[in-house]
Amino acid sequence: MQHISDNDRAILRWLQLCLVLIFAMVILGGVTRLTDSGLSMVTWHPTGMLPPLGAEQWQAEFELYQQYPEFQKLNRDMSLAGFKAIFWFEYSHRMLGRLIGLVFLLPLIFFLLRKMVKPGLTPRLIIMFVLGGFQGLLGWYMVKSGLVSNPHVSQYRLTAHLLSAILIYGFILWTIFNLAFPQRYRPLTQSAAAGWRKASLALLTLLLITIASGGFVAGLDAGMIFNTFPLMGGALIPEGLGALTPWYLNPFDNLVTVQFNHRWLALVTGVLLIVWYIRGRSRFDDVTLQRGFKLVGMMVIIQLGLGVATLLLQVPVLLGALHQAGALLLFSALLFNAHALSRV
Ligand code: HEM
């Protein structure tokens, strides 16, 4: 560990706690979706905290749900017990969001009042808080899209909600790395270092595009078809690929294309990251830099395996959640790697 001031260390610990909670929030969001629980709460009261208390309030909440298309078209035979099961997932997801808001805001006020935040960091912390609020709004905007005649949330809004969660997570993680590793390494000439830095940013961008394509697979339930690998329907180029008109809707609305794109984007990203690991692992003397490459190499293999298993087994909840967690961990590893390179 490099030398860090006491104030920075306190802020670092606090941000680490927030990050762990956000990680849990992303996974719980995934489980909420995978268990088809996300449309169980049909209203949004950003300050309301309590779940239904007692039989009467539960019945009233259930009756509210019954007025919406998910119940009317898909869940007509659902019992109150069944409703409670899906309600608790969505409720926990929302409450965890509010808890994160408090765990972020109260210490932030304390640190600001005690003047513990170093110059330059305050705007970043305020932006994080604003982005967190925006994420909640985006979540409700997504849920609303499923409360209309078609009881499925929009895949566009789901992907936006997922991507924005990952970007906020990445912003906080980068700030954590800034605090934890303030010093520079000196292993390379500046021009060689610039090449590695640019490549790490390109790989991060590609990984985010792959993650977004996964969001579309999740949003359209496109992992429930073509449950074979590597072929789709016995062919490398499956039937129905690009069949929608106008053509530009295919990557976003055509289940076959959406799954095809995610597979191939993931494989290209995966191969490039493995090459990156092989080339980078012994290129630098510093242990932190070496660790970054190793983490990326390890996580990318795990993530590819989880993706294929999720597909072959038709998206069981546990594997779906692990695959989502894997995406976040791979992103974290590459961010760690990129941050270390930015200090070269
Ligand atoms: C670099 C590798 C990969 C990354 C970063 C990645 C990322 C993601 C992400 C972020 C999601 C959305 C999860 C959610 O919102 O719940 C997803 C979904 C999915 N991915 Fe991947 N993925 C990768 C590789 C693969 C591979 C190789 C396959 C299979 C060949 C695959 C199959 C799937 C399936 C079937 C889903 C839908 C799961 C669901 O409905 O929850 N992925 N992926």
Image: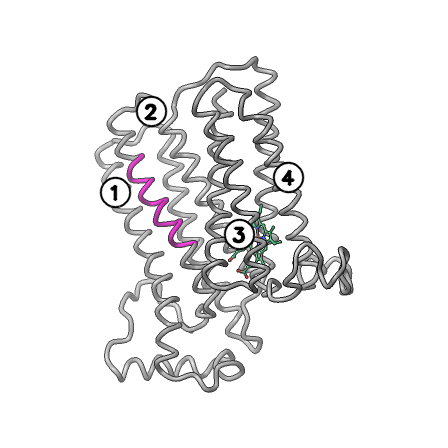
The number of numbered badges drawn on the structure is 4
Between residue 188 and residue 63, name the one nearer to us: 188
Q: Quadrant of residue 182?
A: top left
The residue tagged 1 is: 107
Q: Earlier in the sequence, mark 2 or mark 4?
A: 2
In the picture, the disc for residue 58 is: none
Amino acid at dot 4? Val
Q: Quadrant of residue 216?
A: bottom right
The residue tagged 2 is: 1
Q: Disc 4 on helix, strand or loop?
A: helix
In the picture, the disc for residue 271 is: 4
Furthest residue toward bottom: 77
Amino acid at dot 3? Leu
- Ligand 1 shows up in the quarter that is bottom right
Residue 124 image position (x, y, % from top left): 40, 37
Q: Which residue is painted at 33% across and 83% down in the image?
A: 60
Tag nearer the camera, 2 or 4: 4
Q: Read off the magenta span.
A: 12-26
